[in-house]
Amino acid sequence: MTGLSAHSFSASALVVGTVIQPTSLVARSLSEFIDTVAAAVPRVLSGLVFLTLAYAVVRIVLAVVDRSVSRIYAGDRALIGNLLVTVVAIFLWFGVGLTFLKVVGMGDVAASLGTAVGFIALGVSYALSEMIEDTVAGVYLLRDPDFNPGDRVEAKGVTGTVAAIELRKTRIDSDDGNRIVLANREIESRWTLDEHAKTEPKTTARE
């Protein structure tokens, strides 16, 4: 009888222990989760406040930049201004994103992300080097007072009238009736302005 009672008590203790162990595990997990949330709330609130202020500051900065650039690049040169504003906006918002990660306690992620984006940007700039060169040359051509649509020029063996100057390409209506499209980097280095009706031909060359 005593042996049977001891066996029953042992079985009951085993059942109780089996029930209590999962309950204790759930309670501990719930407690850790609540502590984690409680610790994260101040950082999240700080991050939201930072994003609100950063949004206002970025909008003001972009408005100032856009207004300043619009005065310099007006009319058919507005494309350059839009490009500059876009580049500034990308840098500003990227900086805001990295700072936000640091504010919410994810500084390691911000550092890794910044490094990764830097390498990606380096690879993209190398792959698009010719496109970037065309764009830079296009900016110079658009700013050049001697190179405008309607001017007769000679560039890369093509003589004709400038039909359009774009950020990467220039379109020239040649004397034989064809429209020739040239990359800006091919024109900006050396081209000749035909000024027969005014003065002698003027040659512009850049090394």
Image (cartoon, rainbow, N blue to C red):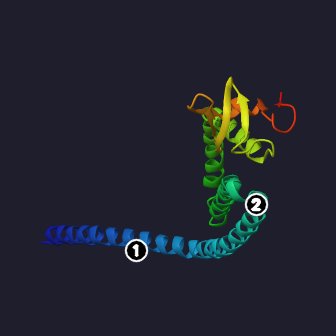
Is label 2 in contact with label 1 (beta carbons under 8 Å)? no
Quarter that holds the N terminus = bottom left
Q: Could you say which is closer to the camera, residue 128 or residue 174? A: 174
- Name the residue at 71% across, 28% down: 155
Quadrant of res 19? bottom left
Task: Tell me if 176 is positioned left or right of 132 in this view.
Answer: left
Q: Looking at the picture, how far across and down is residue 156, in whole percent? A: 69, 25
Residue at numbered disc 2: 69
Residues 139 and 49: in front is 139
Spatial separation of the CA atoms under disc 2 and disc 1 = 60 Å
Name the element at disc 2: helix
Name the residue at the top extreme: 157
Q: Position of residue 13 (x, y in %)?
A: 26, 71
Q: Is residue 99 left or right of residue 18?
A: right
Could you say where residue 172 lies in the image, as x and y percent from the top left?
Answer: 63, 36
- Which badge, 2 or 1, comes first in the chain's sequence? 1
Q: Is residue 198 left or right of residue 76?
A: right
Q: Amino acid at mark 1?
A: Ala
* Closer to the camera in the image, 33 or 84: 84
The crowding category of the residue bearing disc 2, from other C-alpha atoms within 10 Å (few below 14, some 14 to 19, many at least 20), is some
Q: Is residue 193 above or below residue 145?
A: above
Name which residue lies at 57% across and 76% down. Answer: 41
Outermost residue toward the front? 197
Quarter assignment of residue 169:
top right
Q: Amino acid at mark 2?
A: Val
Mark identifier at residue 27: 1
In the picture shown, does residue 45 fall above or below 125? Answer: below
Residue located 61% across and 76% down the image: 45
Q: Choose between 131 and 204: the one closer to the eye.
A: 204
